[in-house]
Image (tube, rainbow, N blue to C red):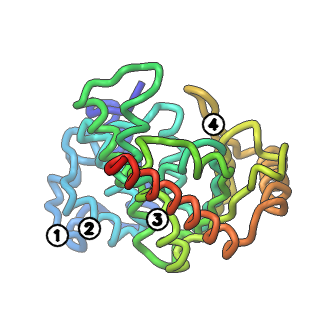
Amino acid sequence: MAIEDNPESRRKYGEELKRRREAAGLTQEQLSERTIISRTHLAHMEAGRRRPDVTDARRLDQTLATGGFFERFLPALDGKAVAEHFAEALEFEGQATVIRVYGPKLVPGILQTRAYAQEVLSSGSSPKSDEERDRLLVTRLERARILEDFHSPVVWILLDEAVLRQHVGGPAVMCEQLCHIVGLGERRRIRVHVLPFAVGYHALMEGVVSLMWFADQPPIAYVEGLKSGRVWEDPSVVGECQVAYDHALGDALSHRESLALIRSVAEEHAHAARHAQHP
């Protein structure tokens, strides 16, 4: 199930707009003046009767200092989608100042290239139409915008070596994907650590984990399995997830060693792609 354009989605969007406006101590009239959005249009948005366009959402984010929240959630109102179990985690992701993600089999969504993401979204046990796939693809690629700001959020990525070697979309797609990760690492936008096969069993092997920290609220953990996911806010559970992540990180290669390995595997994929073109 996905979040789509419907009265309930618009209502929730409007409620969040009103909550954040009031938290900033602004009336609708004051917000209207600062965002150059008519007061009537703002009133309709808060009541869930109208949706903002991209320009409106960006002005709201800038004025209310919401870190891209309102623009990020436009896909939900545009009929684009995310998995229902990930919707809450997506909201937290847009607010986080620090994100640490573990990927056991696939490249985490915020790092996926278009070709890689398209292959992931085209496969699976539930066939999707081209339209459904493209809606999901737009939303997934939007998530990568959090990396456009060099300073925030701080992003650490922990990957099993299997992620590098799994042929998702073929060698050319994999080469492009791994080079993208290397580029982000070399520009110091992310820190990346690889858990090599030689490590064997480690503390995070049982599933996908994302840890997030915030400027004004306690940290959370998001744990995901097949067709399911849950945000944990209980401090004891979040603490256990943080300890598990730290243990696994201690078994991983350093950032520099990880980038070297990723480059090497990318070259292997590039060689395989060239061989496929010219056997």
Nearest-to-viewer mark from 2 and 1? 2
- Per the model, the C-alpha gap separating discs 2 and 3 is 34 Å
In depth, the one of 222 and 247 nearer the eye is 247
Residue drawn at x 36%, y 32% as measured from the top left: 122
Select label 2 or label 4 by which is in front: 4
Q: Are marks 2 and 3 in contact (CB under 8 Å)?
A: no
Q: Amino acid at mark 3?
A: Cys
Q: Where residue 59 is drawn, which disc sits there?
A: 2
Q: Which residue is mark 1?
A: 36
Mark 2, residues whose alpha carbon is within 10 Å: few (<14), some, or many (≥20)? some
* Label 2 to label 1: alpha-carbon separation: 8 Å
Marks 2 and 4 close (CB-CB < 8 Å)? no
Q: Are marks 2 and 1 in contact (CB under 8 Å)?
A: yes
Residue 25 vertical placement versus 270 (above, below): below
Q: State which tag comes first along the sequence, 1 or 4.
A: 1
User: Residue beneath label 4, please?
Assistant: 224
